[in-house]
């Protein structure tokens, strides 16, 4: 319940502290006394949209704090609104988001204003009323779980079908691209190998001359480097130097032999050169076509296309599997919806009877009401039902939707009766009515007060008039 409300610099209020009690309380006073400001401040601290115009003129910040006691736990909610438009909310001095604040408020308090009477035209509100009386949270949660599972299964199937359709349209082109890469028979490092071979073939004579010159210098008959090294003897001076010379001799001899081997392999081969150049041109053409920079990237693209091709082959099988999953999820959802519908149907008659009794007490002596549950065209987040509150104010009148036939005063009384009915099954500790008795006077007003007082026996009820 709401125990304490503190308001600082809100509208015309500089500082106010209000203590509230349990049971039924009436806030009354002349027009302009500040009743609406109190409720506006309370709505703000509970998560209503902030407006800097509500800050007292000349002040930079307004602060509103509400203290609740819920199941023995003290909950202090504070809202701060600055002139620059910045708003912050705190619960027990910890900053909370607006979503968190509204979620907390929803289980602590219900502020019923006149514009909420329009909710009677909302099918979702009518379903919530029936569910509150039916106390079918377990059935509704089971349906919600099944409904979300069905949506996920349906979305997965639709996405796969979209992919399959697109893939099928692209299938021929994918196969064409894959065939080009497969027939190229690429392998890693091939481009570098070919470029090296092309250079060797293109400069064969120059390379042979360089190799021959190197061989002559290293191991030729005319005073070669190897011959000179072989004659050097410095072991008596330095064994280390002698070992290094011998090591150099071995290394240079190996180089000379390698040069001779390469010389024998370097030949001018125009036919092979043409083959290498054609191969390089093919690789470069494929790189341009597939927007790749290396053979390795071309091979990665080939692997990707192969995977796509394999996926195409398995689309039908996967679609069949997801179709079965969707069908199973639909069946489970439909069963859960049926259970939910039955829970609603059980309470429709008692709801109508209770509302008629309260409306009779509120001066609509010949009221007739019916709560109709009918199948919806499709499954929604709340089930497979359309719930409609039907109303007739006088004898002989046909039942029609409340929003279509009830006057403003009748709607207000119906809403009060609904609030009184749901209060018996709701765990909501605090309900505030804003001018619920507008347009009502005399004995009807007295009876309305009786209903409000009756509601106050099980929770905190405050009425502004």
Image (cartoon, rainbow, N blue to C red):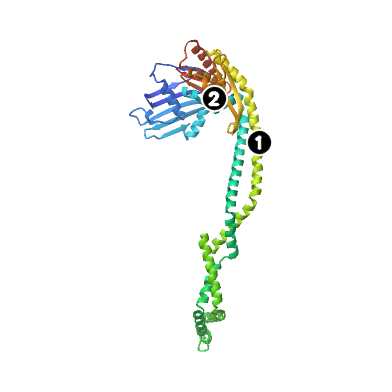
Q: In this view, which residue lies farthest toward the left?
A: 58
Asked if 452 appears above or below 224 in the picture, the reply is above
Q: Is residue 63 visible?
A: yes
Badge 2 local density, few (<14 within 10 Å), some, or many (20+)?
some
Question: Horizontal placement of 372 versus 439: left or right?
Answer: right
- The quarter holding residue 129 reads top right
Q: In this view, which residue lies farthest toward the bottom?
A: 222
Tag on residue 383? Answer: none
From the viewer's perspective, is the residue at label 2 or at label 1 nearer?
1
Asked if 408 appears above or below 178 in the picture, the reply is above
Measured from the top left, where is residue 399 in percent x and y? 57, 19
**Residue at disc 1, secondary structure:** helix
Question: Horizontal placement of 78 versus 358: left or right?
Answer: left
Tag on residue 332? Answer: 1
Asked if 170 appears above or below 152 in the picture, the reply is below
Q: What residue would you read off at disc 2?
A: 428
Count of marks overlaid on the render:
2
How far apart are the two marked residues, 2 and 1, measured between alpha carbons? 32 Å
Q: Observer-nearest residue: 453 or 317?
A: 317
Measured from the top left, where is residue 136 in percent x and y? 62, 27
Q: Observer-nearest residue: 154 or 403?
A: 403
Q: If the image is split into quadrants, where does the C terminus sit?
A: top left
> Residue at the spot x=61%, y=55% of the render?
309
**Residue at disc 2, secondary structure:** loop
Q: Observer-nearest residue: 394 or 459?
A: 394
Measured from the top left, where is residue 77 in percent x and y? 47, 29
């Amino acid at each position: 319940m709401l125990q304490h409300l503190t308001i600082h610099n809100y509208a015309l209020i500089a500082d106010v502290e209000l203590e509230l009690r349990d049971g039924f309380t009436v806030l009354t006073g002349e027009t302009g006394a500040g009743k609406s400001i109190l409720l506006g401040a309370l709505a703000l601290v509970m998560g209503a949209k902030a407006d800097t115009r509500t800050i007292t003129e000349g002040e930079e910040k307004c602060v509103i704090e509400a203290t609740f006691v819920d199941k023995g736990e003290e909950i202090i909610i504070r809202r701060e609104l600055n002139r620059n438009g910045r708003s912050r909310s705190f619960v027990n001095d910890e900053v909370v988001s607006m979503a968190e604040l509204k979620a907390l408020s929803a289980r602590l308090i219900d502020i019923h204003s006149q514009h909420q009477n329009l909710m009677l035209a909302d099918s979702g509100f009518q379903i919530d009323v029936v569910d509150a009386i039916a106390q079918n949270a377990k059935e509704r949660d089971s349906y919600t779980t099944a409904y979300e599972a069905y949506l996920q299964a349906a979305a997965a199937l639709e996405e796969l079908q979209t992919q399959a359709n697109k893939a099928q349209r692209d299938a021929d082109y994918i196969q064409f691209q894959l065939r080009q890469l497969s027939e190229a028979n690429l392998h890693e490092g091939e481009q570098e190998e070919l470029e090296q071979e092309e250079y060797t073939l293109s400069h064969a004579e120059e390379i042979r001359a360089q190799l021959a010159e190197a061989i002559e210098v290293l191991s030729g008959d005319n005073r070669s480097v190897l011959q000179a090294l072989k004659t050097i003897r410095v072991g008596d001076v330095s064994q280390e130097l002698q070992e290094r010379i011998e090591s150099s001799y071995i290394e240079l001899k190996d180089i000379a032999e390698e040069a001779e081997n390469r010389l024998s392999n370097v030949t001018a081969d125009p036919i092979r050169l043409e083959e290498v150049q054609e191969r390089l041109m093919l690789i470069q053409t494929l790189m341009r076509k597939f927007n790749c920079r290396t053979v390795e990237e071309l091979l990665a693209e080939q692997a990707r296309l192969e995977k796509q091709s394999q996926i195409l082959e398995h689309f039908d099988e996967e679609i069949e599997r997801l179709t079965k999953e969707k069908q199973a999820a639909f069946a489970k959802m439909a069963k859960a919806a049926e259970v939910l519908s039955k829970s609603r149907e059980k309470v429709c008659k008692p709801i109508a009877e209770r509302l008629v009794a309260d409306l009779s007490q509120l001066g609509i002596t010949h009221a007739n009401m019916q709560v109709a549950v009918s199948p919806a065209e499709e499954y929604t987040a709340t089930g497979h039902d359309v719930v409609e509150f039907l109303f007739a104010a006088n004898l002989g009148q046909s039942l029609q939707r409340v929003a279509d036939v009830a006057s403003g005063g009748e709607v207000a009384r119906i809403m009060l009766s609904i609030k009184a009915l749901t209060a018996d099954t709701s765990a909501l500790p605090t309900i505030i009515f804003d001018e619920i008795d507008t347009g009502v006077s005399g004995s009807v007003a007295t009876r309305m007060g009786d209903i409000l007082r009756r509601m106050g026996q099980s929770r905190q009820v405050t009425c502004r008039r």
